[in-house]
Amino acid sequence: MLTADLVRASVKKGVVVPRYVDAGDERLQAEAEALMEAFRAHVGQPIGALEEAIADLIGDSTDYLRQRGLAKLLMDRARVETVAPRPPSEVRAVVFRHAGALWPVGPPGVAGLHDRGAALAAAAAELGLTVQAVEDALYADLKAEQRLVEVDLPPARTLLERYNLALAQAVLLRARQAVVTLEGADPKRVRQLFRIIKFHRLMHRAERTEGGVRLTLDGPLSLFRQTQRYGLQMALVLPSLAHAERWRLEAEVAWGDQKREASFVVSSEDGLASEAPDLGTWESDEEKHLRATFGALDTLWQLRRGTRIVDLKGRGVLVPDYTLHHRDGRVALLEIVWFWRLQGFKDKLALVRKHGPGNLIVAVATRMNVDERDTTLDEPAVYPFKGVIQPKKLIALAEEVGRKD
């Protein structure tokens, strides 16, 4: 993701407009290739040498922000390590001890100073290394001396596409809230997005629209004014959203040093492409355990991922995590509420009970600071769990509330 100093955007009539690049532009692709060649040529070399090569490549170009941004994205794909035969801190301790015994030390041939090489040679003998190895390891953990071990170099067009996505993500870091509209989305895509939002622990509310679904995501500055961590989580949703066919995101942002109010709009019409694998859903460890233990039971019920969009009489939507299917045609819906979502879901529970399906089971995580004496947890078909979800408990509830479609 791009840092604030690398964001290329302007504000026009209160709207933040990122300066996207044309990923098909051959000149820009050649520029990207040149940067990637610098990375390729410096594999195994110190990062400081790579940074100097990038600076020479960019020179006094008027497009230095874009080129620096591309270099930042390539660095994000690089693996950098401290390469030394012994931990540099250990080497320094030994060298400094021997230097202290010979003090004062300096370059050879300087009157009144002991030869610096004598301290290095004594340290090398103690460490079982060559003098050159000691010299190389002495400050190998400094950023400029760390080595570029490997780098994942994408095609030039892919790098430029990633740049555009990173620009949009950098703007979202400053969002107070965002509204996402999905048009004509199938339930599986909505389910995927809901689960990714849950994975990133974003507070959200949803409602049906005439042509799809609208999601409102509360932003970092609405509750957490001292941190951009929540904004980062919001920005991380964008690569998955870009997989949808027709979508639009409208955000309120605090822009610039003065944090002035502005708006930001990005949609499928901007042509953002995502490298993120379109794998479908995130699955928690608790859910993995549930699926494994449920599958091992001898039961007439089957557990399947939820793909239904449940309309709450025009007052919101619910996309349950799972559905339980009985061989006789009965179905029960399962929504899992994690502790970070509990307060928001409690506010919604009355709506679900009034306008939601009668065959809904709500499994509520009761760990951390959730009050288990909360009467909300005593409602019918609400299953409070701690640690793991028990399949037999779910089956018992499904027998109570399950009904045929």
Image: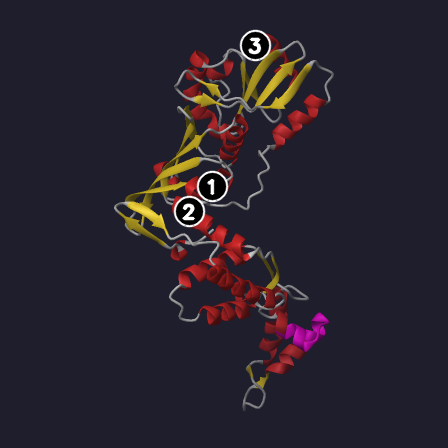
Q: Are marks 3 and 2 in contact (CB under 8 Å)?
A: no
Query: As displayed, is residue 62 above or below residue 348?
Result: below
252 lies left or right of 375: left
Q: Are marks 1 and 2 in contact (CB under 8 Å)?
A: yes
* Gap in angstroms between the C-alphas marked 3 and 2: 45 Å
Mark linked to residue 264: none
Residue bearing mark 1: 238
Task: Determine crowd level at label 3: few under 14, some 14-19, many 20+ residues with C-alpha closer than 10 A.
Answer: some
Question: What residue type is disc 1 on?
Answer: Leu
- Can residue 73 be seen here? The reply is yes
In terms of sequence position, does the residue under pointer 1 or pointer 2 come before the other? Answer: 2
The residue range painted magenta reads 123-135
Residue bearing mark 2: 168
Q: Quadrant of residue 103?
A: bottom right
In terms of sequence position, does the residue under pointer 3 or pointer 2 come before the other? Answer: 2
Question: What residue type is disc 3 on?
Answer: Val
Residue bearing mark 3: 401
Q: Which marked residue is nearer to the observer: mark 3 or mark 2? A: 2
Secondary structure beneath dot 2 equals: helix
Task: Determine crowd level at label 1: few under 14, some 14-19, many 20+ residues with C-alpha closer than 10 A.
Answer: many
Position of residue 87 measured from the top left corner of the image (x, y, whole percent): 64, 63
Position of residue 237 measured from the top left corner of the image (x, y, whole percent): 48, 39
* 397 vs 71, nearest the viewer: 71
Q: Is residue 396 magenta?
A: no
